[in-house]
Image: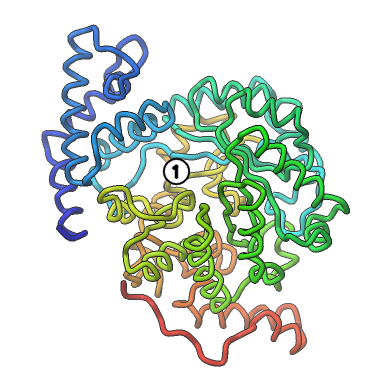
Amino acid sequence: MNVESNIALIRTIFGNPIIRPIIKFLSTHEYNGRSLLNYALTIYSGEEEAKKVKLIISSLIVSQIINLGLKILDVKEEEVRRMFKNRSLRRGLEVILRSISKYGITLPQKLDAPFLVVWNFTNMCNLNCKHCYQNAKTVLKNELTLEEKINVLKQFEEAGVAAIAFSGGEPLIHPHFFKIAEEAVRRGFYTAIATNGTIITDEIARKIKNIGINYVEISLDSIDPVKHDNFRGVRGAWEKTINGILNCVKNDIFTGIAVTTLKMNYKECRKIIEFAKNIGVKRVIFFNFIPVGRGEEILIEDLNPWEREEFLSTLYEAMRDYGIEVLSTAPQYARIVIQKSHGICISPLHFYAGPPVGGLNYLAEFIGGCGAGRLYCALEPNGDVTPCVFIPNIVLGNIRNKKFKEIWNNTPILSAFQNKDILKDNCGKCGFRYICGGCRARAYVYFKDITAPDPGCINNVEFYEKVLCELKHKTELDQNQFNLITGALPIKPKSTISP
């Protein structure tokens, strides 16, 4: 059965007028402070027994619905039951089912709550990175108090958020961090830290491990200490970062390396991946550079479309060659992976790239591509909620005066992030728009329009050239600087708009 047929079948089953009201009833009716849907999913996983008649009936109904879906997806029931013993994954499935009952099957799927919130925990930082989207250095006067942070966790739990990634600034240097992280783990969130790693001693690594934090992602931008230190603004940072990585690996923490992709380092990607594998790192993720915050000052470092295409192709080959997770936040990576593997591999989200589980390849159509304001959002140190850490100027609301659930569900501008059929120009016409759709932050930074084309894509060369002309005019670049930015190839690759 082809992708289109499977998508149609999913719509028929989960969008039918009987199943949707059933799921809605189970998600809106409670027993002992928990929804019947939550009970049913917990019982399905084997983590709880059904002792009341209403819970037995609820669990039987949900079990039948899930198993029907698994048949379509060609996924084994026992694998899923085992997977959903994890509370955060159950919470994610609950969000999906609740969203289907509320919105029906949409393409991409509109969610009742984000899977992930990136929490910029503080503006404090011990480095001075050239690209910092947060422009972090010192603590802000209006950062959330400890009591307010605990309330944030309650609101995230109430909304159904599955995962929290603590970022910054540097979260580990804030005195509230471990108390809040421990509480996040206790409440069942998948809990991650994005850190520069410089203060992760063996003792701190053990503390991270003992609390139960699921994942630590440490920034490393080059295997050359001088290059890394220059970019991070502090001499000796590279050595401290490497020690932090090694301490996490030694304490058996799931550890990833995060690389900001720039002209200065994109050709190093294979060396970085090989280095990561040799020191025991499980994942390397290459972040799209978005010129916001201090990053506005190094716009010259942004990859052009040809460089990005070459780079993402190299990443796919490296993933295959080195046997560790190699990911990118560039939405175009999903297209590259599908094209290079002839559809055998998928990368629907920036935390997975590889062979699909069962028939999950077509689920990329529902959940793939840029997740800003759709699958995830950001929380600023002062309580502002934004659609993405790289779009700080669009404030959806503040958690101090409006509940998170209300902000997510009742802010009109989010509908523009959640509808890929309104994307403009080539991004809107592209056959890969549901699994890619371009980076909305890059569109906003360059064109002040979240539905504009992403000028970093090979299909949007004319828009990239428009950006260059404006940049040259505004900044009065000399020809050498202009040539450095463009780095254009003499023969431009063909467009890849059609899948």
Q: Position of residue 186 (x, y in %)?
A: 53, 20
Q: What quarter of the picture does the C terminus occupy?
A: bottom left
Model colouring:
rainbow
In the depicted view, which residue is nearer to us: 25 or 57? 57
The residue beneath circle 1 is 411
Taking the spot 50% from the left edge, 83% from the top edge, the residue there is: 462
> Where is 298 relative to 147, above or below?
below
**Residue that protrudes farthest toward the top in the picture:** 51
Q: Is residue 149 visible?
A: no
In the depicted view, which residue is nearer to us: 247 or 377? 247
In the depicted view, which residue is nearer to us: 415 or 43? 43
Q: What is the secondary structure assignment of the residue under circle 1? A: loop
> Where is 255 relative to 447, above or below?
above
Q: Is residue 39 visible?
A: yes
Q: Is residue 186 left or right of residue 349?
A: right
In the depicted view, which residue is nearer to us: 214 or 272? 272
